[in-house]
Image (cartoon, helix red, strand yellow):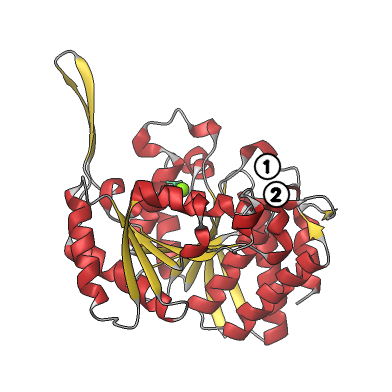
Amino acid sequence: MNKTIAVIRGDGIGPEIVGEAIGVLDAMAAKFGHTFTYQEAPMGGNAIDAFGVPLPDSSLETCLAADSVLLGAVGGPKWDSQPSANRPERGLLKLRGAMGLYSNVRPARMFSDLSAACPLRADIAARGIDFVVVRELIGGVYFGSHSTEEVDGEQKATDIMAYSEHEIRRVARVAFDMARKRRKRVTSIDKANVLDTSRLWRKTVTEVAAEYPDVELRHMYVDNAAMQMVRDPSQFDVIVTENLFGDILSDEASQITGSIGMIPSSSMGDGTRGLYEPIHGSAPDIAGQDKANPIGTILAAAMMLRYSFDMAAEADAVEAAVDKVLKDGYRCGDILGESGTLVGCREMGSLIRQRI
Ligand code: IPM
Ligand code: MG
């Protein structure tokens, strides 16, 4: 198969980790007889420096014309003083909106070889961590209007949080469909004791659940969920929640696995074109030092193979190569532990390529 992949290398460690992911994709393509064409789409701080805006129209067009999009990470302290409408993050939000990517899937799984890196108490970790956060990605307070005005001699800021039923329904279906392929349990997370958006969320998710009688639905308040996630994460299978809650909970979910550098994510709309990225940030403190862990991006590329290109065997091959490298004891600094062999970003990429 021939596929065109838009590549957003981004800022900080972005270019290093994306470079390794492309190397792995090419090794896989050679083995399975595919051809991937990569098209650069600058976005983030580097795009602000070069074009004055975080997402130039040409990059957006490249992404919209591609079969899928691979992203490293954007942002960094260098652009912190940008006006909020021109921050690197704005580019990402604009891209998500323009591509219609309403569901963001972030698996939180503890790799058995990395359980030593789990920060939870051993008896809690022993019960295992294997759940998925499905986050609504283009609605809620992120996409409501934002304003700051002068009122009675002081500044007053407002952010609008809004949800329509169709926005809730479509992401709920993603969660229920996913649960069907897993342990058939959905936990919908909201703040229905306070927010109208959450009450509508709860009602709509409950309606969608009627289409999935084989899947168990449970509702949980977001504050309780944050606590339950550290108390007993083994209770979760598929979590579905709105944009801001999902942003916060997915960071917590990745942290409890002990391996934030290992976790990929996919953002999808109605079609097969998605945006695939690691869930970690641009880590400017270690950028350019060959220290970053490329595994999150490599596993994001595997998700692209599986979900955008329907290449399940190829995705399995990439994931198996990652598992093998870990079994063989190789570790980047973030997951080193006591007995691993420390390797840099480039060597980790090359070790994974060799095992494909
Ligand atoms: C994420 C990030 C983004 C978000 C930022 C960079 C805008 O934290 O993908 O979770 O809040 O969605
Ligand atoms: Mg986040």
Picture coordinates of residue 257 (x, y %)?
60, 56
Identity of the residue drawn at 36% across and 34% down = 84
Seen from the viewer's position, the closer of residues 86 and 247 is: 247
Marker disc for residue 133: none
Seen from the viewer's position, the closer of residues 81 and 49 is: 81
Is residue 228 in view?
Answer: yes
Instruction: Check disc 1 and report its element: helix, strand or loop.
Output: loop
Q: Label 1: which residue?
A: 287
Q: Label 2: which residue?
A: 292
Instruction: Say whether residue 344 is left or right of residue 257.
Output: right
Front position among marks 2 and 1: 2
Instruction: Check disc 2 and report its element: helix, strand or loop.
Output: loop
Instruction: Say whether residue 138 is left or right of residue 16.
Output: left
The reply to whether discs 2 and 1 touch (Cβ–Cβ < 8 Å) is: yes
Label 1 crowd bin: few (<14), some (14–19), many (20+), radius 10 Å: some
The three-letter code of the residue at mark 2 reads: Ala
